[in-house]
Each structure stands twice: as structure tokens, then as C-alpha cells.
């Protein structure tokens, strides 16, 4: 295991993040503020509470998840796609650096950035709602697992993409709808029985549910199921990355 | 010195059916400069890409420093540095950080003194804090070399190192390459500029249509395939060649002051002595003689055309 290379990739990616710090954090914070204004103040004023939790507070875990998923996928996919686009990927491919080191470096940095932004949103939310986190350790566990899991997905998207359009299409066409349909702004229990069952096919529901449990002790699905779902996704995604690097698909063609 | 790279029956066929390399075998000695020549699409870049691990071969094996590039890839790659043909750099990174990043990829920790030495040797030290996008084309190429040298490789691949650069910069790059060789680095370069190979290489390999046509010491190659021209300068101009010399393969210049004589260095007898004697017998006074050898470019073109 070449830990120096993991460190080098991680550091380089984080430096890129800090070079564009203002735009990296301004955009998600402004978006979140708008969500609070629209969903919390305008719509929340009519919903009052969901399962005893003020609506404004209820959407905080969902908003954090929305951000973590989008940021993880965007950071990791761009992180690996850009060297492919600019040609600098050759350096990674000729170095004594294996798939696991490359993945750890890029995914670690993407997950770090996503977690940083999510915590910033949590901080921002305290300006709008009054709430406390019941299980802070589990909240961090879910946050880290989700960030890593979706950074792995983003990493695969970046490896797969042949152009910037493909880089955008999966986050736009798949990730965002899954988050909105995954109970970010409502409880799955509020859906009619048929749609509640359909919603349970959405992996994001398990993430949002587990994360919301860490905040309020309430979950749409058992917390253990949420953890297993994330773990399975992580293993499958790691296996896919390993396959890509070992076969050289879209890398060494 | 022994072999540092052993390429054994390497082939590469792409999915489209294109055969980029066809059963290529060669051995590269430690400390030498090997120039790989060939027209566009000949397979030069594919060959070095396979050795460096960028392209997976469809057949054959490669060993670098005794390590198989597939089964013992980490050890093999630690010995190699690659300077790609394209200027592929993160333009927003500083020169020094870019070199440090390369070191990190090879599992090397910080070594400020060595990084400074590399940057100074490539006259980049003053630009260490500059973003790469601020540098000239020539400096960017030197950054690529600095990055390739960051982990102290024993073998350096230079893929068309002077493509598209001006003459001054090309000569500067040659100086860098010579210095690297003096430092004990084995250098393999691909080039279109035959002048480059002629100037620097110890051995020359010619690749065409995926096949290695030959691999010889440069001097042997020039001697074996090269013709020499003897130019004879006379005191008085001639209007025509004397009767006895017309059956020789001689070329009289338009001003009648020089005679050109082409001879094959491979033949045992050049015929120079007899020619000079015949000129003297014909009463022609010779002022000066000079020989010129055909360039590697002519050798190369002859060879590629011959095997086409």
C-alpha cells in the first residue's frame, strides 16, 4: 500500500477545494437558505409539524443529505474526470499507485469536502430552527458513510464519463430525483401505502431515514437496515472501481 | 552495464482490429540513449506506453530492472519516469507543488533539497512559486521533465520531447538530456526529428507499421546504410568531364569548379584513390577535397521505403 500517494492525491484535491473556497461554500449555503425560506417559512407555516417535529427542523437532515449526495458525487466525479480531460491522468497510471490508493485519495477528498459543506449547512440551519441532535456520533457515522458511498459513485461516474455532458447527466437525472423522492422533505409514512412501498426501493430513503433517526430518534425504516444498505452499496461500488482499474476500462484503452 | 528493459514479443491489437505493434522484441542497456524513430502511427508511442503501463499489451512480456510490468508492476514502475508528448499539466498548480505531487505518487516523502536540485538543473527554480499557466511552452516542457525526475527514476521516457518547440529550445532540451545521461539515467526518446537522434542517441531503433525494422548503434547504422559523398574542388573550371571519367558516377557542378562522387561505405573499395589518380592523369589540378556522410534522415527514409 502506497500511503504517500494517497496523501498526495488527497492533499492536491483539498488544495483545489481551498483555491475555490468561496464558490465551494457560498453556493450550497445560499441554496440551503433558500430551502429554509421556501420550505421552512412558506410551506412549513402550513404543515406545522411532522410526527411531532416542527417542519423546519424535520427537513434539516434531508437538506444535509441532499447536499452531501450532490457534493460527494460532484466532487468525486469532477476530481477524477478532470485529469482524464486534461491528460494529467497519465501520471496516476504510470506511478506505482494501485486502484485502492487512487480511489482513497479522490474519494477521501470528495467525502471530506461534502462533510464540511454539510456541517456548514447544519450550522446555518441553527439560524432558522431550534433543534438538537439526539445521537451526534451516529449522525457523524451516517454522514461519513453516505459521503464515502456517494463519492465512490461519483468516482465511477467520473471514470465512465467521456465528456462534461455525461458528467452532469447522472447527478441531474438520477441523484437529484432520488433525493427528492427519498423523503428529504417528508416522511415516507405520509405517502399512500403503495407509494410507500415503491419509495422503499429508493436507496436514498434508507440514508435519509437513518440520518433523521440520528437527529430525532424517528425513522421510516429500521436503522440497522439503513446501515446495511449503505454498507452493501459501498462494497458494490468498491468492487466496480477495482474492476475498472484492473481491466483498464476507459483508462488504459 | 546490463539490460534495464527487456521487451519480449510484445503485440498490441486494438478493438477496432488495428495492429499497433506486431511481435516487437528489444533490449535496452542501462545508461544508454535509445532513439525510436518512425513515421506517425508507426507504434513508437504505443511501445513506450506499454512499457510505462499506460496501455495493456495483447501479447508478450516486458521486464524493467528485472521486474515484470504486469506481475511486479509496483517495482517496475518505480524505476520509470515518463515525459508525455502532450503538455499535460494542472495549470493552476505551482511548479514546486506539481513536482512534489509527482514525488508523492511514487511513495516518496518530502525531499526539499532534491526538488530544489531538479528545479535548478532545469532552470525552473526561480519559477517555483509560479502557477504553471503563467509559464512559456518551453518551461512547461521542463516542468514535465522535472515531474518525471521527481522520484529519481533509472529510466526516462521522452515521447517527442521537442515536438513543436523552436530551435533554441530544442538545443536546450538536448543539453538537459545529455546531463541526465551523465547522471546515469537511461533515456528512451521517440522523435520525428532525425537530427535529434543523430545528435544524441547511442542506438537507434526504427519502427514502422508496428514492427521494429532495426535496432543498431547509431554509428553502425550510418556506416552500414549511409553513403558518403566526396566533393572535389578544382583550380580551374571544367566545361565537361574528361573522356576517361565519363563512365564514372560523377556529378560536375554548374560552375564547373567541383565534382561530386558518391560511394558506398559498405563496399571494400571506395575508388577514391583511383579517381584522384585519374584526375591527375587528365591534368586536372585539385585544390581541395571534402567528404560528407548522408544524414540519418536519408538513412531512415531509405530504410522505411525499402521495407514498405
Image: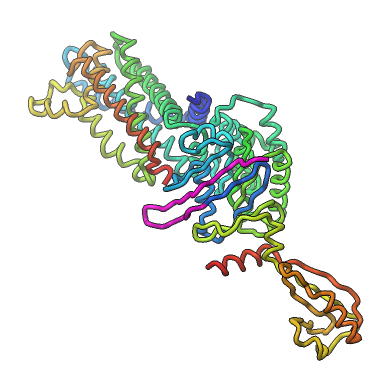
Q: How many marks?
A: 0
Predominant secondary structure in magenta? Answer: strand
Q: Quadrant of residue A183?
A: top left
| B116 and A216: which is toward the camera | B116
B96 displayed left or right of A183: right
User: Magenta span has B138?
Assistant: no
Residue A56 visible somewhere in the drawing:
no
Query: Would you say B51 lies left or right of B120 here?
Result: left
B3 horizontally vs B240: left or right: left
Where on the picture, by quarter, is residue A159? top left
The magenta region covers B1-24
Outermost residue toward the front in this view: B268
- In-front residue for pair B183/A138: B183
Residue B299, can we see it? yes
Residue at the limit of the structure toward the top, as seen here: A134
Q: At 80% across and 86% down in the image, what residue appears?
A: B245
The picture places residue A106, in percent across and down from the top left corner, at 44, 30
Residue B294 or residue B224, whichever sits in front: B224
Whether A194 is drawn above or below B278: the answer is above
- Give the x, y percent position of residue A170: 30, 39
Q: How is the image coloured?
A: rainbow
Q: Residue B246, position in %: x, y?
A: 77, 87
Q: Quadrant of the N terminus of chain B?
A: top right
Q: Position of residue B268 (x, y in %)?
A: 75, 69
Residue in the foreground of this view, choosing between A199 and A66: A199
Give the residue at x 20% y 13%: A218
Residue B21 belongs to magenta span: yes
Amino acid at each position: 500500500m502506497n500511503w504517500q500517494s494517497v496523501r498526495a492525491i488527497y492533499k492536491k484535491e483539498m488544495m483545489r477545494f481551498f483555491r475555490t473556497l468561496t464558490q465551494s461554500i457560498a453556493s450550497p449555503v445560499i441554496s440551503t437558505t433558500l430551502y429554509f425560506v421556501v420550505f421552512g417559512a412558506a410551506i412549513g407555516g402550513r404543515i406545522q409539524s411532522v410526527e411531532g417535529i416542527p417542519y423546519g427542523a424535520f427537513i434539516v437532515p434531508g437538506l444535509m443529505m441532499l447536499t452531501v449526495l450532490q457534493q460527494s458525487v460532484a466532487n468525486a466525479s469532477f476530481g477524477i474526470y478532470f485529469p482524464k480531460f486534461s491528460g494529467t491522468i497519465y501520471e496516476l497510471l504510470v506511478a506505482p499507485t494501485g486502484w485502492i490508493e487512487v480511489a482513497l485519495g479522490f474519494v477521501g477528498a470528495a467525502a471530506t469536502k461534502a462533510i464540511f459543506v454539510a456541517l456548514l449547512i447544519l450550522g446555518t440551519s441553527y439560524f432558522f430552527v431550534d433543534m438538537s441532535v439526539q445521537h451526534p456520533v451516529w449522525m457523524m457515522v451516517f454522514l461519513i458513510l453516505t459521503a464515502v458511498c456517494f463519492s465512490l459513485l461519483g468516482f465511477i461516474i467520473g471514470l465512465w464519463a467521456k465528456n462534461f455532458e455525461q458528467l452532469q447527466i447522472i447527478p441531474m437525472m438520477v441523484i437529484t430525483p432520488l433525493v427528492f423522492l427519498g423523503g428529504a422533505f417528508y416522511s415516507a409514512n405520509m405517502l399512500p401505502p403503495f407509494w410507500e412501498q415503491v419509495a422503499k426501493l429508493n436507496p436514498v430513503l434508507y440514508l435519509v431515514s437513518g440520518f433523521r433517526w440520528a437527529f430525532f430518534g424517528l425513522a421510516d425504516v429500521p436503522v440497522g437496515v439503513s446501515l446495511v444498505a449503505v454498507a452493501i452499496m459501498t462494497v458494490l461500488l468498491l468492487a466496480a472501481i477495482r474492476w475498472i482499474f484492473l481491466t483498464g476500462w476507459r483508462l488504459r484503452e | 552495464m546490463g539490460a534495464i528493459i527487456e521487451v519480449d514479443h510484445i503485440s498490441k491489437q486494438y478493438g477496432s482490429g488495428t495492429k499497433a505493434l506486431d511481435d516487437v522484441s528489444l533490449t535496452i542497456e542501462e545508461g544508454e540513449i535509445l532513439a525510436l524513430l518512425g513515421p506517425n502511427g508507426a507504434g513508437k508511442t504505443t511501445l513506450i506506453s506499454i512499457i510505462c503501463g499506460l496501455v495493456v499489451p495483447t501479447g508478450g512480456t516486458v521486464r524493467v530492472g528485472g521486474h515484470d510490468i504486469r506481475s511486479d508492476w509496483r517495482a517496475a514502475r518505480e524505476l520509470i519516469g515518463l515525459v508525455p508528448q502532450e503538455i499535460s499539466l494542472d495549470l493552476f498548480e505551482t511548479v514546486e507543488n506539481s513536482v512534489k505531487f509527482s514525488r508523492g505518487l511514487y511513495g516518496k516523502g518530502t525531499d526539499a533539497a532534491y526538488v530544489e536540485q531538479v528545479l535548478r538543473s532545469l532552470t525552473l527554480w526561480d519559477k517555483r512559486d509560479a502557477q504553471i499557466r503563467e509559464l512559456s511552452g518551453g518551461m512547461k516542457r521542463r516542468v514535465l521533465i522535472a515531474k518525471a525526475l521527481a522520484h529519481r527514476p533509472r529510466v526516462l521516457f521522452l515521447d517527442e520531447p521537442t515536438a513543436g518547440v523552436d530551435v533554441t529550445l530544442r538545443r536546450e532540451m538536448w543539453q538537459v538530456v545529455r546531463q541526465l545521461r551523465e547522471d546515469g539515467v537511461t533515456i528512451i526518446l521517440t522523435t520525428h526529428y532525425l537530427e535529434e537522434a543523430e545528435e544524441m542517441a547511442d542506438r537507434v531503433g526504427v519502427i514502422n507499421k508496428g514492427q521494429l525494422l532495426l535496432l543498431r548503434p547509431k554509428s553502425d547504422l550510418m556506416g552500414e546504410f549511409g553513403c558518403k559523398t566526396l566533393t572535389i574542388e578544382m583550380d580551374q573550371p571544367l566545361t565537361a568531364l574528361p573522356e576517361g571519367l565519363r563512365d564514372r558516377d560523377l556529378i560536375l557542378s554548374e560552375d564547373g569548379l567541383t565534382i561530386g562522387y558518391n560511394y558506398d561505405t559498405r563496399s571494400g573499395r571506395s575508388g577514391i584513390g583511383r579517381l584522384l589518380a585519374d584526375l591527375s592523369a587528365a591534368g586536372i589540378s585539385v585544390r581541395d577535397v571534402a567528404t560528407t556522410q548522408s544524414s540519418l534522415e536519408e538513412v531512415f527514409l531509405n530504410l522505411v521505403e525499402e521495407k514498405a
